[in-house]
Image (cartoon, rainbow, N blue to C red):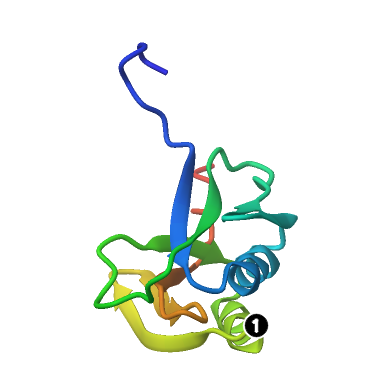
């Protein structure tokens, strides 16, 4: 941290009604250990990532469009999207900007997130 007054990102928390189901969806999708301790679900941080996802049970369902969403990256966008659907999520629009391609997805409670196709590293400048 820069100083005592500068906060550091600890986790992103997703509000949900079905805590067990949503914790399992996100943990399985991301391939990380996960567990529920009411009223929270925790995903273990994965290698190379400093922040993680937590889930929090709330009484109300999501209403309206997300104002904040997760951006994920996968080596095989199509395979990652099939995984989302197999786990109970759904797919939205596929989009692109310059050389970037991504698909908007929805978890089982309708929370939006994007999965981007990983880019090949630039060729060596030798």
User: Closer to the camera, 22 or 9?
Assistant: 22
Up/down of 71 relative to 11, above or below:
below
Q: Residue furthest right?
A: 33
Q: Residue at x 63, y 52 (%)?
A: 42
Q: Residue at x 44, y 64 (%)?
A: 58
Q: Residues within 10 Å of mark 1 (few under 14, many from 20)?
A: some
Query: With 95 as the anchor, is 24 left or right in this view?
Result: right
Q: Quadrant of the C terminus?
A: top right
Relative image position of residue 107 (x, y in whole percent): 50, 77
Q: Residue at x 49, y 88 (%)?
A: 90
Residue 24 figure quarter: bottom right
Q: Is residue 118 visible?
A: no
Relative image position of residue 23 (x, y in whole percent): 62, 65
User: Closer to the camera, 20 or 75?
Assistant: 20
Query: With 30 as the anchor, is 95 left or right in this view?
Result: left
Relative image position of residue 114 (x, y in whole percent): 42, 70
Q: Residue furthest top?
A: 3
Q: Is residue 113 visible?
A: yes
Residue 113 figure quarter: bottom left
Relative image position of residue 101 (x, y in whole percent): 39, 74
* Count of marks overlaid on the render: 1
Q: Residue at x 39, y 87 (%)?
A: 92
Up/down of 40 relative to 21, above or below:
above
Up/down of 3 relative to 105, above or below:
above
Q: Secondary structure at mark 1?
A: loop
Q: Quadrant of the N terminus?
A: top left
Which residue is the site of mark 1? 87
Up/down of 112 relative to 36, above or below:
below
């Amino acid at each position: 941290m820069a100083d005592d007054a500068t906060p550091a990102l600890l986790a992103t928390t997703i509000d949900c009604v079905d805590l067990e189901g949503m914790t399992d969806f996100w943990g399985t999708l991301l391939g990380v250990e996960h567990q529920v301790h009411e009223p929270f679900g925790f995903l273990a941080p994965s290698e190379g990532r400093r922040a993680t996802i937590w889930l929090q049970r709330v009484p109300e369902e999501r209403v309206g469009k997300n104002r904040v969403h997760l951006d994920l990256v996968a080596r095989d966008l199509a395979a990652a999207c099939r995984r989302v659907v197999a786990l109970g999520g759904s797919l939205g629009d596929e989009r692109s900007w310059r050389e970037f391609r991504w698909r908007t997805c929805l978890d089982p409670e309708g929370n939006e997130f994007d999965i981007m196709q990983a880019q090949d590293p630039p060729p060596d400048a030798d």
